[in-house]
Image (cartoon, helix red, strand yellow):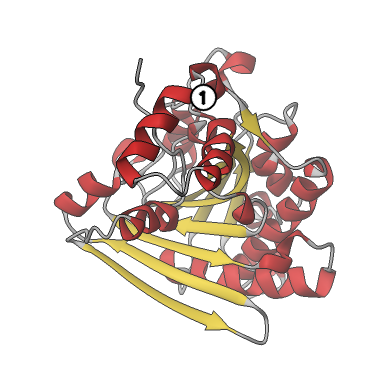
Amino acid sequence: MQMDYRIRTDLALETKERFEEDNVEVSGVVIEGSYDEERDIRTTLVKIETEKGAKAMGKPQGTYITMEAPNMSVPDQDYHREISKELAKHLRKLASLDKEKSVLVVGLGNREVTPDALGPNVIENLHITRHVLREYGTLGMGEDRAHAVSGIVPGVMAQTGMETLEIIQGVVDETRPDVVIAVDALAARSTKRLSRTIQITDTGIDPGSGVGNHRDGLNAETLGVPVIGIGIPTVVDAATIVHDAMAHLLDALEEQERKEFLEEMISPHLHTMFVTPKDVDETVKRLGFTISEGLNIALEYV
């Protein structure tokens, strides 16, 4: 019996690459790339400009910036500082941080599940300033102008019994931030991008999407304020790995024959399994610090 085999990825870049592999041109989608040879950082901009393009990509209209840095998985503090600076540059532009703003940073994920603990780790290292500004004003920060930064780790439904969106909507209604920045772990199509890729988007984020556990999305429509999503892939669908390994063995078959064979052979239970690197605990802590530093740099001055 055949099944509907679909490659799972949260990265807009990988979705676009899938169409390119099939020699399919997606109208309404623009892609631009640049490469910093000195720092070995490749940046790709995917802009979905039309509803037709959004439907084809399976993602909302908006801007998706992907930073690929192979050395990001290496514990090199100087290099990670460069990654943080590059991230800050994109954040300032997407979130329009050229004037004073109230910014709520949401650390999505589950502290108890290591590959899903990226968001909570980011909040741990974030420079929170909202309470200082409310108490002492900008002089308490030693600056003439400063962003009011607050942060929250809403947990997951199994811990709270509430949708993440419900919690964040309550916080947004009460604190009225100008922009929300949500950080979450993602799923990648390729193992090469695990812990080596950062995606920034102005379309928001869907909590739990990385492991196929889709919750109500955090976006401008549901929260009433602009939402910037930041994510790093920490897991790969197990079925994807099996698919790739078997595909190499079947290169001699015609494309359609190979596709049909793989759809029949990959067991359905693999679609509930995800694979993550063995050093994910150390890696997630390091990457959480890298993202928090990027946020701190982006929000440290106006």
Q: Is residue 34 above or below residue 103?
A: below
Q: Quadrant of residue 63?
A: bottom left
Whether residue 139 sits left or right of residue 187 in the image: it is right
Q: Residue at x 65, y 59 (%)?
A: 196
Q: Quadrant of residue 53?
A: bottom left
Residue bearing mark 1: 271
Q: Residue at x 55, y 12 (%)?
A: 161
At mark 1, the secondary structure is helix
Q: How many marks?
A: 1
Whether residue 294 sits left or right of residue 248 in the image: it is right
Q: Is residue 70 above or below residue 181?
A: below
Whether residue 132 sits left or right of residue 302 in the image: it is right
User: Residue 271, can we see it?
Assistant: yes
Given the image, on which type of amino acid does mark 1 rest? Answer: His
Q: Residue furthest bottom?
A: 38
User: Residue 95, can we see it?
Assistant: no
Residue 74 locus on image (x, y percent)? 80, 63
Q: Is residue 218 above or below residue 95?
A: above
Q: Residue at x 46, y 74 (%)?
A: 98
Residue 223 locus on image (x, y percent)? 36, 39
Q: Quadrant of residue 272?
A: top right
Report the front residue among 150 and 90: 90
**Which quarter of the figure is the C terminus placed in?**
bottom right
Q: Residue at x 82, y 44 (%)?
A: 279
Report the front residue among 253 and 93: 253
**Which quarter of the figure is the N terminus placed in?**
top left
Whether residue 156 sits left or right of residue 125 in the image: it is left
Label 1 Cα neighbours within 10 Å, binned few <14 / some 14-19 / many ≥20: some
